[in-house]
Image (tube, rainbow, N blue to C red):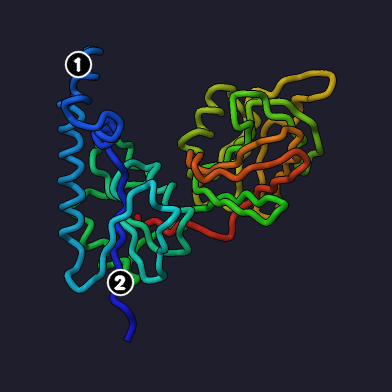
């Protein structure tokens, strides 16, 4: 007889949590903010509201199921199991944070505050969590498979992301490298390279497109294709600016060879889990074989 499903509820610290962690006590945090014309009460209210949503979602887990609560910072240390049903309570970005840790487990996104969260990936109101969990466990869900991006280093290290991977200098210096795509090879100096999915087309990639009025059509979330953009490429006698954007099909890739001593590669804003490129090392980005199973 198989194991009962496990509900894994993913959440993140609130701004109130972070203020208390930084200042030690609520009183010290209140004093710090008051000196700057700010008020802790609003952050405390949002904290309480978020806690209430977490409690409401947790109360809907079937009594026979196992359960776990995982904070965003602990995702890299948490071992997900095949029978897990993952419930993400938070902003859209939290779904991206957990997606890289999964292998086909269904994800239910719960929006705790529709007044501030767009709800692109966290589409469901808290009261629907229970029925969606049970349907996901019984494989009776309407779900979509979202494309992910994979970045692989030549030392065997691999990183996956739902929105995008970023490659750039560990500080604010220019990154120096050679980029290779189907159209050719070019040495560049820039603020970094973004390679993203159709899901990422609603975030960082969208910002890049709107800023430069780029003609690159961004893929849809389910398309097995990626878009890539070089940020602020600098022309010089040794570096060019002709290869700065494009699309990558399922059977294609983009390769970056580092000519800086410390470039970082991270996905979906998780800089704490970055890979590092030494001078002469290569990174190749392509469509990942993994996909996010997102409950509609």
Residue in the foreground of this view, choosing between 247 and 94: 94
Picture residue at 30% right of the left edge, 36% below the top: 117
| Dot placed on the residue nearer the N-terminal end, 2 or 1 | 2
Residue designated by label 1:
34
Residue designated by label 2:
5
Q: Quadrant of residue 94?
A: top left
Q: Position of residue 227 (x, y in %)?
A: 61, 40
Q: Secondary structure at mark 2?
A: loop
Left or right: residue 159 compared with residue 122: right
User: How far is disc 2 from disc 1 in space, using C-alphas?
Assistant: 47 Å
Left or right: residue 277 compared with residue 30: right
Q: Is residue 115 visible?
A: no
Q: Position of residue 79 (x, y in %)?
A: 42, 63
Between circles 2 and 1, the one closer to the viewer is 1
Q: Is residue 143 visible?
A: yes
Q: Secondary structure at mark 1?
A: helix
Q: Residues within 10 Å of mark 1 (few under 14, many from 20)?
A: few
């Amino acid at each position: 007889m198989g194991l009962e499903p496990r509900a894994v509820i993913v959440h993140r610290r609130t701004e109130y949590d972070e203020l208390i962690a930084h200042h030690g006590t609520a009183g010290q945090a209140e004093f710090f903010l008051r000196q700057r014309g700010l008020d802790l009460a609003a952050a405390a209210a949002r904290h309480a509201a978020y806690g209430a949503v977490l409690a409401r979602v947790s109360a809907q887990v079937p009594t026979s199921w196992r359960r776990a609560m995982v904070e965003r910072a602990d995702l890299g240390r948490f071992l997900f199991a095949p029978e897990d049903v993952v419930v993400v309570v938070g902003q859209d970005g939290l779904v991206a944070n957990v997606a890289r840790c999964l292998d086909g487990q269904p994800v239910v996104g719960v929006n705790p505050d529709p007044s501030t969260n767009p709800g692109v990936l966290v589409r469901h109101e808290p009261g629907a969590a229970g029925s969606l969990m049970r349907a996901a466990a019984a494989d009776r869900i309407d779900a979509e498979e979202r494309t992910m991006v994979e970045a692989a280093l030549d030392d065997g290290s691999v990183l996956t992301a739902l929105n995008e991977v970023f490659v750039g200098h560990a500080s604010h210096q220019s990154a120096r490298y050679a980029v290779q795509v189907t159209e050719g090879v070019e040495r560049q100096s820039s603020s970094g390279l973004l390679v993203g999915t159709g899901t990422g087309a609603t975030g960082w990639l969208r910002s890049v497109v709107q800023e430069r009025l780029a003609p690159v059509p961004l893929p849809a979330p389910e398309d097995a294709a990626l878009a890539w953009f070089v940020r602020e490429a600098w022309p010089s006698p040794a570096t060019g600016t002709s290869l700065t954007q494009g699309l990558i099909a399922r059977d294609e890739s983009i390769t970056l060879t580092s000519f800086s001593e410390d470039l970082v590669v991270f996905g979906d804003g998780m800089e704490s889990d970055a890979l590092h490129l030494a001078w002469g090392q290569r990174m190749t980005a392509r469509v990942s074989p993994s996909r996010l199973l997102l409950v509609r």
